[in-house]
Amino acid sequence: MPELPEVEVTRRSFADRIQSARILDLRMGKPLRWPLGVEPSALQGQRILSVRRRGKYLLLDLDEGLLLLHLGMSGSLNFATQQAPAGPHDHMDMVTDRGVLRLHDPRRFGAVVWAPSENSATAQKLLGHLGVEPLEGGFDVDAFALALKKRASAIKQVLLAGDIVVGVGNIYASEALFMAGIRPTVKASRLSKPRVARLHAAIVQVLARAVQQGGSSLKDFVSAEGKTGYFQLEAAVYGRTGAPCRVCSSPIRSMLQGQRTTFYCPTCQKP
DNA sequence: CATGGGACCTGCGAGC
DNA sequence: TGCTCGCAGGTCCCAT
């Protein structure tokens, strides 16, 4: 579920409610991608000062240090005053005086890591190489073009790498490239400036719109505790192999790039 | 140092 | 019905 829009929508759904809450207890379930890095009891009594997002990570600033949360491929967060008994896929319960923040993550690619500061080696190992935020002022077309010039790989894989711009996951990489009319296999370094400009705009547009729509689908998501809503964003190409392109009716194709499925329209997207 | 492949883990649907 | 296989929203780590 979690690409940048869902992580951001998740953040907005509980950031205000958990602000200034005091941690009463932290219970960890099965191992996640990395160990917490601190005794859970050491966090008792600390307050949550703010909830920020960096790429697909959520950062919970504490009195001492911060927690980095990642939802991996299958993670979701729920913040509620009452939580049912933890199930087999609930791997973190952060009990606070404002409610319980629960991480549900069947595949356990997610993470909950404590770091002494954002500049610490622990935090920088995860955040240090991340590219710019696409929905904030720092996403500049010229800098984007310059960075792409240095990359020999296919544009789709460069987007997924996240070291130039963050937040574009497997769904939105396909969607943005469709919107920009660019074949996913084109070498990043060979994109003309006008095409880079179109891609830049497409990334911003597709992510911003998803955040908006995520906001409206979040109610369903939280209360139904399912994936409702995510695919309500009618994908143009993602998951539509063989179906007619919404623009030109050509059958949408899929292919494998770096172990990930890519979807594209062979007519609308030029090599 | 950029790049590509493997690894991590579980659930689900398709096909036999 | 029951089993096996392939695939799924991410990204770090390690050879090359």
Image (spheres, coloured by chain):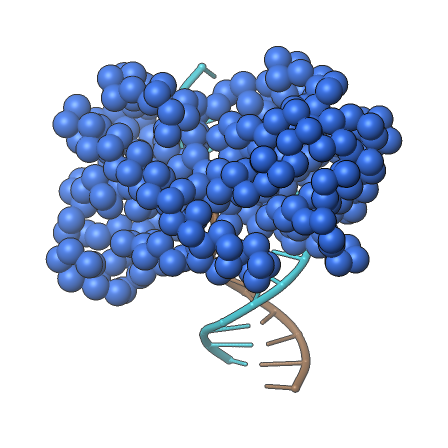
Chain colours: A blue, B cyan, C brown
Q: Residue at x 82, y 28 (%)?
A: A45
Q: Which image quarter: residue A241? A: bottom left
Left/right placement of residue A40 relative to residue A99 reads: right
Q: Which image quarter: residue A224? A: bottom right
Residue A169 is at least partly visible in this image: no
- x%, y% of residue A238? 34, 54
- x%, y% of residue A75? 60, 48
Q: Nearer the viewer, residue A50 or B9?
A: A50
- x%, y% of residue A221? 53, 56
Q: Which image quarter: residue A19? A: top right
- x%, y% of residue B7? 63, 42
The relative height of residue B5 versus residue A44 in the rendered view (above or below) is below
Q: Residue at x 42, y 52 (%)?
A: A216
Left/right placement of residue A146 relative to residue A230 reads: left
Which corner quadrant holds the C terminus of chain A? top left
Left/right placement of residue A79 relative to residue A167 reads: right
